[in-house]
Image: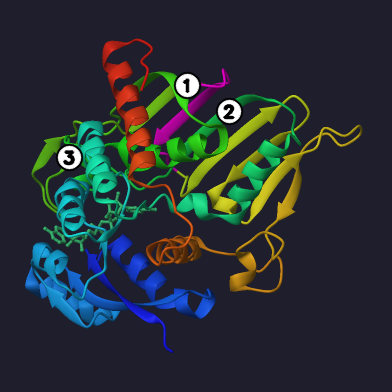
Amino acid sequence: MGKATIGIGLVGSGFMGRCHANAFRAVGGLFDLPVAPALTILADATPDLAERGAAALGFDRATGDWQALVDDPAVDIVAITAPNLLHAPIAQAAIAAGKTVYCEKPLSTTAALAEQMMQAAEAAGVVTLVGFNFLRNPMIRLARDIITSGEIGAVTGFRGRHAENYMANPEVPHSFRTDPAGGGALADIGSHIVSMARYLLGPVAQVQADCVTVVPDRPIRPGGTERAPVLVDDMTHALMRFDSGVLGSLEANWAATARTMDLSWEITGTRGALAFSQERMNDLLLHSGAPGRSGYTRIEAGPAHPPYGQFCPAPGHHLGFNDLKVIEVAELLNAHAGGPACGPDFREAWEVQKVIEAMQRSARDRTWVAP
Ligand SMILES: NC(=O)c1ccc[n+]([C@@H]2O[C@H](COP(=O)([O-])OP(=O)(O)OC[C@H]3O[C@@H](n4cnc5c(N)ncnc54)[C@H](O)[C@@H]3O)[C@@H](O)[C@H]2O)c1
């Protein structure tokens, strides 16, 4: 008997839309899944954009109306890669239709909206997953295993950073990323390092942050001469106290000249330490604390670190960014088919959003804030 076909409805065909489509196309050849995804409908902002996106990404049908995609009985999973402001209405409609929802980060534009989305999803009992794909890296899972095993002793400190340069140039125009309703470096990429901090070290009890805008204005449209002020943060620095009592610090920075993907952190323990940067995502650095072994030793990703072996039987051949999305989609499809629950779900993404908002509030009120 053949596997059940699961209809995928994808909203958006930009950077992340391509990445989701690639993952749904590739996953069946790499993972042994109980179901087979079918690229059923692509929705975009206009029928023309949708037609072009569907042809390029391999979808059967196209629509300029995301509600029609959500309502279509052939769609089982709604994948949302549209701008942040659209996450809530599309997800709420998909939940109301009883569909599995796979939503890009940040879950929404405010913690209050994210909470409503989480409550609706839990009341409806639908599977949800939010695209914090960097957590899918086998080296990040290894880091968590090393921490929980006690190999580096008791954790004593965390320093995290997500720094990229894609907004460093003042000629990069405004977009949904600079929309004061939910935009900014902290929401856009700070959400990744906050989700990773929670994944590795648990809940955050209190934060104190400061935010700055380093590019005062940008073109309203690509290539245009008319400019408008930037009303969101380009850079945020924060202190954070974890529930465990561990003190940490964090930077979110999208104007970090020279940095392309420095989602990085260092965690110190009483006996050892760990360090990682997504710019070298196949390496985890471990300091064992053994006598005569000062400094870090590089652990290279390989089949010993699941699910690396699904992609390649040899170490040192390297996974890439798109592979993390394939792993994410494999977990989503398994959960959709009744297998193990996958995460981060809407509840966890709401927790991340509360930390982000606490940092924004702290910067405004110049005080420590509990998420
Ligand atoms: N997980 C990650 O690593 C990661 C990386 C980049 C972006 N993202 C997230 O993915 C989302 C999209 O970002 P992107 O970089 O792909 O943006 P993008 O601008 O490249 O793509 C957005 C897409 O949504 C479409 N769209 C706009 N309005 C629409 C509407 N009304 N109906 C349907 N489609 C509409 C656009 O036409 C475009 O195809 C954001 O929420 C962003 O935060 C996540």
- Reading the image, the residue beneath label 3 is 179
Q: Are marks 3 and 2 in contact (CB under 8 Å)?
A: no
- Reading the image, the residue beneath label 1 is 240
Considering only vertical position in the picture, is 57 above or below 361? below
What segment carries the magenta color? 242-257
Give neighbour class at mark 3: few <14, some 14-19, many 20+ (Cα, 10 Å).
some
Q: CA distance from mark 3 to mark 2?
A: 30 Å
Q: Which residue sits at x=38%, y=53%?
A: 131
| Amino acid type, residue under disc 1 in the picture | Met
Of labels 3 and 1, earlier in sequence is 3
- Reading the image, the residue beneath label 2 is 158
Q: Are marks 1 and 2 in contact (CB under 8 Å)?
A: yes
Q: Which residue sits at x=36%, y=80%?
A: 4
| Amino acid type, residue under disc 2 in the picture | Phe
Residue 249, horizontal then vertical, whole percent: 51, 24
Q: Nearer the viewer, residue 52 or 70?
A: 70
Q: Quadrant of residue 265?
A: top right
Residue 211, horizontal then vertical, whole percent: 33, 24
Of labels 3 and 2, earlier in sequence is 2
Q: Is residue 148 visible?
A: yes
| Amino acid type, residue under disc 3 in the picture | Asp
Question: Which quadrant, please, contains the N terminus?
Answer: bottom left
